[in-house]
Amino acid sequence: MSQAQENLIVVLDVGSAQTRVLAADLNEGALRYRGHAALESAGMRKGMISDLNPAARVVKSAAEKAELAARVNIDSCVVGVGGPHVRGINTHGGFDLAGRMREITREDVRTAVERARAVERPPDREILHLLPRQFIVDDQPGIFDPIGMIGARLEVELHIATCSGSALQSTVTCANRAGLEVTEAVLESIAAAEATLSADERELGVCLLDIGAHSSDLIVFFEGAVAHTASVPVGGAHFSNDLAVGLQMPVSQAEELKRHYGHAVVTAVPQTAEIEITNPQPQMLRLRTIAEILEPRARELMYFVKESLRQGGVLDALGAGCVLAGGGSMLPGMLDVTESQLRVPARTGMPVRLSNMPGELAHPSYATAIGLLLYAHRTRVTRAAENNGLRAKLRAIFAASY
């Protein structure tokens, strides 16, 4: 494999509305944008792949377009996983360190995590991430890295992010049919958080809500660790469908109305504001009528979010508020509805800019794709550091034997 291929990172984001392939490479230790493609998704239903063949054709086309833009050969990728099948659970586990005080090793940490992950779950659930919230050494909590510490007992509080095994396999199969090998699967809300949240927000407590087309994924960080993950069954497409039904027009026309004239707060729209539409005859439509249809759906979305936060025990842990990402976050008034329903400050999550990145990608709808790149990069750096550390220890062992 050439050095250019080794430095290449490619991610695949198969959403209900858009399928995106984004390529970047490592340039002097930093990520540099190389190229991307975004096409309308096919074979999707309710946030999941329902027909592999059309979905794979779109992925293949997107990968080919990204190849041309990046001028590289793309044969593998990191995929994002999200949608209504995502679940998260918090667990706890630990063990006595042979009944005596001693130094905690990496193997001890693995054992504690294995004890915590040994919880019953349905056979179709696949573990995506094991995310330690904190370690506890001899009843001392709040420890993030216990390796090298001295103690007699090690415990861990763990967050386990899971997904439907069949849904994950459908995404992998879709990529494989498009000629791409999947090297890693990443929870999309974790990726979006990577691109939009600051370290201070994660420490104070923050909810990231990624509003997709057919569902909205959320993740909560508190004291720097993941405390809650979930998905709620409302997304941007539901807003458009409400308009289509309420105004008796095609969904495509309703989508355009939402994008150009939609608002989630009725009272923020002037009472006299009107536009002319053809439906099918020319007629005048009050902009408040559009908002009167959209606001109840926005409030319903935030009701589901609030209930999920309450059930996860993190409703009162949002010291830094709520961050909205995804295409659905751009509907005017969504921040106001979020603040009024959750009673915390809210902001729009703009993804960090990569070197050479075009301006069109600096948009909340690209938060997941850019976050997948950042996550894959960080994972690669971490693994390289661990491998270098292991090689250094082996060299020291062999040097000592002579």
Image (spheres, grey):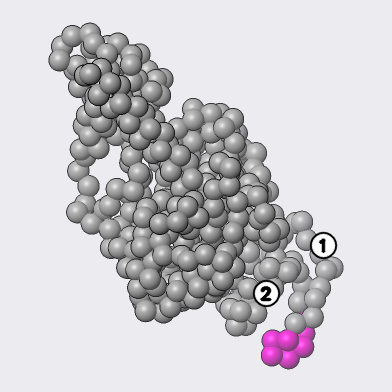
Which residue is more in the foreground, 381 or 124?
A: 381
Identify residue type, mark 1: Pro
Confirm whether residue 232 shows in the render. no
Which range is magenta?
A: 278-284
Q: Which mark is residue 256?
A: 2
Residue tagged 1? 270
Dots 2 and 1: beta carbons under 8 Å?
A: no
The residue depicted at 35 percent of the width and 27 percent of the height is: 392
In the displayed structure, does residue 247 sit left or right of residue 285?
left
The residue depicted at 40 percent of the width and 61 percent of the height is: 76
Q: Which quadrant holds residue 342?
A: top right
The image shows residue 232, relative to residue 149, as above or below, that is below
The image shows residue 117, relative to residue 297, as above or below, that is above
Q: Residue furthest bottom?
A: 281
Q: CA distance from mark 2 to mark 1?
A: 20 Å
| Camera-nearest label, 2 or 1 | 2
Q: Position of residue 328 (x, y in %)?
A: 60, 60
Which residue is more in the foreground, 41 or 301?
A: 41
Q: Position of residue 14 (x, y in %)?
A: 46, 65
- Secondary structure under tag 1 reads loop
Q: Position of residue 146 (x, y in %)?
A: 35, 20
